[in-house]
Image (cartoon, helix red, strand yellow):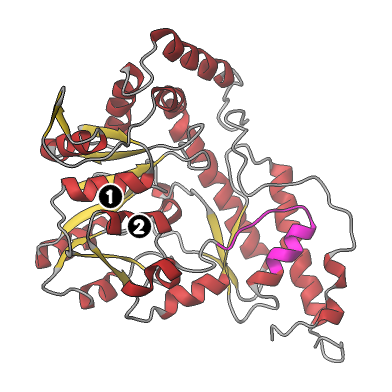
Amino acid sequence: MHSFTQDCSSFLTTPPLPSFIPLVDVRAIAPSEQTGFESSLHGQIQQAIQSVLAQGDYILGRAVIEFELAFASACTSPYGVGVGSGLDAIALGLIACGIKPRDEVLLPANAPISTAMGVVAAGATPVFVDVVLTTGLLDLVAAEKAITPQTRALVPVHQFGQMVSPRQLLDLASTFDLLIFEDATQAHLAEREGYRAGAVGVAAAFCFLPWRNLGGMGDGGMVVTADEGVAQGVRSLRDSGISRRHHHTRLGTCSRLDSIQAAVLSVKLPQLPAWNGDRHCLARHYDHALIHLNLPGITALRNETGRGHSYERYTIRVSDQAVVNAFLLQAMLANQGIQTEMPWGKPCYRQPAFQPYHPSHCPNTDLLSQQALSLPLYPSLSAEQQRRVVQALQSACQTSTRLYSPGHPCG
């Protein structure tokens, strides 16, 4: 059904590009009619940066301490420790939780590459587990089957803003005496079953890349935990293993959240609930549009958490029943000036760097890597821009239907 010859591909390059709609617009940090945000946020950020410059405490300064407390509180946890990146949050957090070399750590086969590298950086052995086809989340049945006497921890990835079931995670961890370390890098303020992302396991990793729901103006991460010992461990590890001035009790690294980034994030944090609300509203519009269009074989990844989904991304699945495959659909939307992304184009567990840890086959992960496509979604996406995305999606499917019709040279 998806055969497509070169003779039928010329239409991909003929029309002029309309105004560009990015997958995410990191420049637009404020205005939204639904929430009444003010463009003064730009001014507040400039003022926060100037404050750091005036104080001169650029590394682990007052802005970092204030943001750590505020963000941890937003996650319903008492401790937050800012680090240099999401990868470092995974690695240092796991070490502080007691993960030792050669301990096995279960994680989804479609995890972000930084998650798997964080596990390896902690000295542990990543064990890749397949995912649920309808959601892209870790398959806990498959995870249970992968447990061995060496399994020490479980790293669920709350993909695209949707949490893995906390109750099922806690049941599995309790049954097999496993440590839960959440990868919440894509799930700022996500909720499920009465838990907020970051408050399910012993600790959790967050990331503040510019395109996250809460994004800085550079790199940054945080470990959130209710365990004071874990928090103290990460504080030591991030700062060269220091316990007090000129006294280093362990081998650490240099991974500290910059004061300027913390200041920027502190300005944005109060807006995050409203921004997540905007994302949820836009996702519902996409959902309704897909139902109305009734495009065979094209469905959204299932939302199992309702309002608790923070929609870091909105991702559709283009199955074999569709008239077009995800690769071609991406190209056709790009031709209309709409940027999309195949988020799992080459899943983590199939990356060359992880071949030593690739003993098993994960069919659902492989299928999603060929079928998943993320559409533009961010709080400042206008109704007109979203209509353009939906219309382009409909047009692409109609064009493909004509191309595959009986008697057509591509049919």
Nearer to us in this view, 108 or 352: 352
Badge 1 density bin: few <14, some 14–19, many ≥20, Cα 10 Å: many
The disc placed on residue 91 is 1
Residue for point 26% across, 74% down: 141
Tell me, yes or no, if residue 347 can be seen here. yes
Nearer to us in this view, 250 or 327: 250
Is 64 one of the magenta-colored residues?
Answer: no
Q: Are marks 1 and 2 in contact (CB under 8 Å)?
A: yes
- Give SS at disc 1: helix
Would you name the residue on which mark 2 appears? 117
**Residue range highlighted in magenta:** 329-342
Is 335 one of the magenta-colored residues?
Answer: yes
69 with respect to 227 (left or right): right
Which kind of residue does numbered mark 1 sit on? Ala
Tell me, yes or no, if residue 190 can be seen here. no
7 with respect to 241 (left or right): right
Q: Position of residue 185 (x, y in %)?
A: 38, 47
Is 203 above or below relative to 77? Answer: below
Is 103 above or below relative to 282? Answer: below
Which callout, 1 or 2, points at the residue further toward the start of the chain? 1
Residue for point 39% across, 9% down: 55
Is 147 above or below relative to 233? Answer: below
Badge 2 density bin: few <14, some 14–19, many ≥20, Cα 10 Å: many
92 with respect to 47 (left or right): left
Residue for point 39% across, 78% down: 362
Residue located farthest toward the bottom when viewing the structure as drawn: 407
The disc placed on residue 399 is none
Which kind of residue does numbered mark 2 sit on? Met
- Give SS at disc 2: helix
Q: CA distance from mark 1 to mark 2?
A: 8 Å
Residue for point 21% across, 33% down: 235
